[in-house]
Amino acid sequence: MPFATNLTGLIAAPFTPFDESGRLRLAGVEPIAAHLAANRVAGAFVAGTTGEGLSMSVDERRELATAWSEAARNHRVKLIVHVGAAAQCDAVALAAHACEIGADAVAAMGPPYFRPTTVDDLVGFCEPIAAACGPLPFYYYHIPDWTGVRLPMDQFLARGRERIANLRGLKFTHNDLAMFQLCTRLDGGAFDIFFGSDEIMLAALALGARGFVGSTYNFAAPLYHRILAAFDAGDWPTARALQEKSVRLVNELCARRFLPAAKRLMAVVGVDCGPVRPPLADISVADRGALARQLHEFEAIT
């Protein structure tokens, strides 16, 4: 099974641009795509957690995906559309739409309210979603701290490939590195396992990670490119020092409510994405200034 989307390195989970009243602002997509391309980010994972996908209507998500399909083509950024939803029928409809607009791949998280309790149940939930976007590569989005779906992903991959012809791997957003390694090594590395915890990228690299999907790559891609370069050069002291900067940056964001804080940081790099939607709450102007100073202090944007 080949590396289906030819994606390695950094894949950003972009913020969804809203205006100050919370309405979708599609004109903001193009500048985000241009910024990612300028910072050598290989792809965009759209409408996931960072993109507040589950805070949008199905129609809004279609509009967003359509805007991204054009922007991604213009800037040669690979497009992975996240279609996960509480209702399987909504995810199926969004997956079919992603295929129609020419996305490079589709991903879906497990349903976060009525949750599958067995691996077979999860495979059954994903099967029609993946079928709706075939032959595009399909990825399961494993983010158990948010969805509550806590099932062994190596078993999901092993059983899922028997029923989902276009299953190509996972977006693995969890700190269970033992399970991550089992998934990366399954069948000699047959699946694409994108790692989703920016603050422990170096640990995942040591275990064989090739692709990374993250929120902080939107505004701090230069820092992570330096981590990748230090790792490739075998310069572990430098790689560890740079990863510590990532940890400190993520900690500062978490101290101010991660997603609202990270979204406002985009203005520092010249791409204003606006506020978050309720029930998330915006951060103060003072916190925005403090974070902007720390972004420069950690040398994350140069």
Image (cartoon, rainbow, N blue to C red):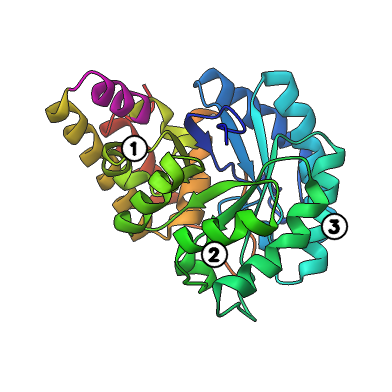
**Is the Cβ of the residue at disc 2 closer than 8 Å to that at disc 3?**
no
| Marks 2/3: CA–CA distance | 30 Å
Badge 1: residue crowd in 10 Å (few <14, some 14–19, many ≥20): some
The residue depicted at 29 percent of the width and 28 percent of the height is 227
Return the residue nearer the eye: 134 or 274: 134
Q: Amino acid at mark 1?
A: Gly
Question: SS of the residue at dot 1?
Answer: loop
Over which residues does the magenta segment extend?
224-234
Say which of marks 1 and 2 sits in front: 1
Residue assigned mark 3: 93
Considering only vertical position in the picture, is 58 above or below 208?
A: below
| In the rendered image, the vertical position of residue 242 relative to residue 213, given as above or below | above
Give whichever of discs 1 and 3 has the lower sequence position: 3
Which numbered dot is residue 281? Answer: 2
Give the percent coordinates (x, y) of residue 264: 51, 45
Residue at the spot of label 1 = 208
| Label 2: which secondary element | loop
* Pointer 1 or 2: first along the chain: 1
Residue 241 image position (x, y, % from top left): 17, 34
Between the residue at mark 1 and the residue at mark 2, the CA separation in whole angstroms equals 37 Å
Q: Is residue 190 left or right of residue 53?
A: left
Percent of width and height locating residue 108: 65, 56
